[in-house]
Image: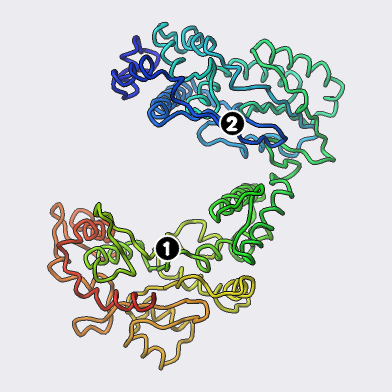
Amino acid sequence: MGRFCEIQTRNELADYLGVPRSKLTYMLYVVGTKNCYRTFQIPKKYGGEREICAPNSDLKDIQRRLAGALCEFQRIYRSEKGIHSNISHAFEAGKGIITNAAIHRNKRFVLNLDLKDFFPSFHFGRVKGYFEKNRDFHLPSEVALTIAQIACYKGHLPQGAPSSPVISNLICQIFDMRLLKIARQNRLNYTRYADDLTFSTNDRSFLERYDVFLKDVASEIEKAGFSINEKKTRLQYQDSRQEVTGLVVNKKIHVPCEFYKETRAMAHRLYTQGEFEICGEPATIEQLEGRFAFIDQLEHYNNKIDSGKHSCNTLHTREKQYQAFLFYKYFFANDRPLIITEGKTDSRYIKAALKHFCPNYPHLVSQDDEGNFHFLVSFFRRSDRWKYFFGMSTDGADAMKSLFRYFVPDLNSPDYSRTFFELCGSEPRNPVIFLYDNETVSDRPLKEFLRYIKLDKERRTTLQNDLSIPLVEESKLYLLTIPLIGGKNECEIEDLLAQETLDIELDGKHFSREDSYDKSKFYGKDTFSKYIYRNYQTIDFSNFRPLLDALNNLI
């Protein structure tokens, strides 16, 4: 199919969006888009309420497809024309309030303007006229009309529809370029985040031109069909707190200190009382994690700017608060027993075995009436976040050694296990289990870990006999290993599978356990574990029973 701008009819538009023609016609002319919304109010930051118009699932799907098509058209157009726009930062891929604020960081003057009734300013005729007359589209009247019908509610773009952001940005392109021209003439930076306009400069003489500049900008805004919200016009000086889209930009980019203090207080109430509120309403731990993650996003940005070396050993205060929260959520207040494996493939084998033996382990896995499995244990997923905050490698067994430091008194790491035990006045909610291959003879990960924690001979024997031992009993931290089979003195988890399974040929290739192998002859653990997971019903998992029994006993 050709480009968006080559669409000639409503039916072609439906085809382009991947929407059945009959469905689009039915939505527009039988149901009517005006009957596809529910409206509600949300409080504005500085008082008053904002109306949100949420489309139903059918209309939302069409709007999302339209938004995606327009975004792709814009991406291709900019690529072909060599356009690298850095003006609009709302609803743009790879951009947001941080990129918007960064342009105005550490400036002598920062001017904020706000457009009144932003989305309602894009009325039905304006939307239709844009796609009809804009030189990049020049769509037939029928197509432009259909787009406006899909996108508008009560005669304008509604706030809450997925198509509104991209259409508003498209229409504002010429407006942005005109404001940029005025800004450059006055030696100012300019960005727009939806209805928030920001100008900044280090030019000392700007104050002499301020009134004329503001008049020119206001005139251009009026020509574009907008009006300024005078109550939100702010000229901010370097010696006072400067904010851009809610972020402080004086030197480094930060959330306002009030936001951080509120977040820290919420966390403390969660730790000590088990619950907290946001804006007077009961809140969830996921909401709190979102606040911490947002604060950390800014800290991460600032760390890049100062080009210093940062790690779990050099965290500053705000990062330590986030580190403590992560430990609390995932290792102290975890809602399910958590298993941490040496590699990502290990969890697939265990999940497959649990599915195979589902009726035998009701405390570990369940199956609903539709046949879907629900694991009652969780498996730790590593990421760069865990590497940064806890020194946990993204793969391999060293991750557990790094994490162990936070469960015990250590000169280089906080004892979070003890901290939260004292704050909460209770034990951890569920066990955390380190799962290792049974390798204690050669210098493999388990042997290294046992040496690191200085495990005595008696407890080593217990580990081999029972497959598990408590590492920090009051913290519900356990060490689990796999059984030894076939008279072997060491076993990897793959050894628990029958030889006929290990010999399975896939696409003419054989399984290799090695990290480096000839990919023309062999396939690796990732492919193999996925095969095991898919074919859990036919695989012989009998050697997994002692491991699952030991896991079941811990839980």
Residue 389 numbered mark, or none: none
Looking at marks 2 and 1 on the same chain, the residue that comes earlier in the sequence is marked by 2
In this figure, which residue is indicated by the disc labeled 2? Answer: 89
Residue 160 is left or right of residue 513, and the answer is right
- From the top left corner, tell me how far across and down residue 129 is, in percent: 51, 8
Say if mark 2 contacts mark 1, CB within 8 Å.
no
Residue at 46% from the left image edge and 8% from the top image edge: 132
In this figure, which residue is indicated by the disc labeled 1? Answer: 380
Quarter occupied by residue 337: bottom left
Distance between mark 2 and mark 1 Cα atoms: 35 Å
Residue type highlighted by circle 1: Phe
- From the top left corner, tell me how far across and down residue 308 is, in percent: 64, 55
Residue 414 in sight in this render: no
- From the top left corner, tell me how far across and down residue 154 is, in percent: 53, 17
Q: Nearer the viewer, residue 121 or 23?
A: 23
Q: Is residue 554 above or below residue 278?
A: below
Residue type highlighted by circle 2: His
Q: Is residue 473 above or below residue 503?
A: below
